[in-house]
């Protein structure tokens, strides 16, 4: 049964259409080009979310995940929050910092990470599975020791569970905090919808609910520790040319929003003081940016292209 028919059956009442934001054509084209460039790393293969026609994704189109992941502003904030939490764990921190290009080429690293997230959520199942299998093979080569002498390997299920839960938490928390509050049942849905991809990555015990997320955070609490690398990462995110030049001043604000979205007890453990979070007057700015981005329909964006692949209207996710 198609995603469109599933949606029709799931709701007996018509859904209100949230009209896309109307912008001048020249501005829409400019934003569309910037979005396409950001999601297509120059040193990697291109990805066409329209292919193969009709093939479903790992997560269905009528999912909450498809709506949460379509917002580029909350996604950027949530991604930074997720990495803050990842870098708090010594094994993950060493693996990321010693075996990736975060320090030398942060923008290319962000592009590849962002594209992987889009493929996982919106890509055709066969292509998402192939991409994830490639990531797993690459991670097989990532091993080492932390500065404290603890051995780690990137495909350790315990580390993968942490990476998976922090990613889902970051995206959910940013959406919940800066766009629309999510009820407990909706939080549970997001974690449950992430499980098929999590298992393909090797996160065999990733949380499937908010309660399980809280339990894993509590179990990991004693492993989390401060590190100068966290501050180095935040500095990179403030200054790396991740956004178009015209939007660059806004980038530091989004990084502060990500720090703000990090749980208070983790911020305390990492030494991320109040001065690194949002000022009171900045919170409404972030919320307005997230609200505007949620109505931004860009033809080249992965969510729109994926809808077209499934025979759904381009504005399907605005309903």
Image (cartoon, rainbow, N blue to C red):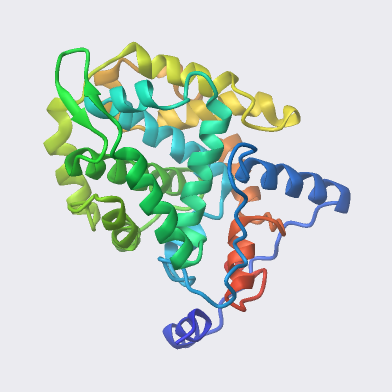
Q: Residue at x 29, y 22 (%)?
A: 94
**Residue 198 versus residue 314 in the image, above or below:** above
Which image quadrant is residue 88 in? Answer: top left
Specify whether residue 169 is in view.
no
Asked if residue 271 lies left or right of residue 215, the reply is right
Number of callouts: 0
Asked if residue 152 lies left or right of residue 20, the reply is left
Asked if residue 157 lies left or right of residue 307, the reply is left
Q: Residue at x 40, y 60 (%)?
A: 129
Please provide percent x and percent y for residue 214: 19, 45
- Choose between 307 and 191: the one closer to the eye: 307
**Residue 253 versus residue 295 in the image, above or below:** above
Which image quadrant is residue 272 in? Answer: top left
Specify whether residue 235 is in view.
yes
Please provide percent x and percent y for residue 212: 18, 52
Q: Residue at x 29, y 62 (%)?
A: 192
Please provide percent x and percent y for residue 117: 47, 49
**Quadrant in which the C terminus appears:** bottom right
**Quadrant in which the N terminus appears:** bottom left
- Choose between 237 and 266: the one closer to the eye: 237
Please provide percent x and percent y for residue 18: 64, 66
**Residue 18 versus residue 145 in the image, above or below:** below
């Amino acid at each position: 049964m198609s995603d469109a028919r599933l949606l029709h059956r799931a709701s007996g009442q018509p859904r209100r259409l949230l009209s896309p934001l109307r912008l001048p054509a020249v501005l829409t084209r400019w934003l569309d080009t910037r979005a396409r460039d950001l999601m297509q790393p120059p040193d990697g293969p291109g990805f066409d979310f329209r292919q193969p026609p009709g093939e479903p994704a790992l997560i269905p189109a009528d999912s909450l995940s498809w709506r949460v992941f379509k917002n580029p502003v909350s996604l950027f904030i949530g991604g930074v929050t997720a990495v803050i939490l990842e870098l708090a764990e010594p094994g993950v921190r060493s693996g990321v910092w010693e075996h990736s290009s975060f320090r030398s080429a942060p923008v290319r690293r962000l592009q590849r990470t962002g594209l992987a997230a889009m493929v996982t959520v919106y890509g055709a199942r066969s292509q998402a599975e192939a991409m994830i299998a490639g990531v797993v093979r690459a991670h097989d080569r990532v091993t080492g020791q932390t500065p404290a002498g603890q051995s780690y390997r990137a495909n350790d299920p315990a580390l993968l569970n942490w990476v998976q839960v922090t990613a889902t938490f970051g995206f959910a928390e940013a959406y919940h905090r800066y766009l629309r509050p999510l009820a407990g049942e909706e939080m549970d849905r997001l974690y449950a919808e992430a499980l098929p991809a999590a298992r393909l990555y090797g996160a065999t015990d990733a949380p499937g609910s908010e309660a399980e997320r809280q339990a894993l955070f509590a179990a990991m609490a004693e492993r989390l520790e401060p590190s100068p690398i966290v501050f180095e990462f935040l500095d990179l995110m403030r200054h790396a040319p991740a956004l178009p030049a015209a939007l660059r001043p806004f980038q530091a604000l989004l990084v502060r929003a990500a720090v703000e979205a990090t749980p208070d007890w983790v911020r305390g453990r990492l030494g991320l003081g109040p001065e690194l979070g949002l000022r009171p007057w900045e919170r409404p700015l972030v919320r307005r940016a997230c609200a505007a981005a949620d109505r931004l329909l860009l033809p080249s964006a992965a969510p729109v292209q994926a809808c077209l692949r499934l025979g759904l209207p381009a504005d399907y996710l605005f309903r």
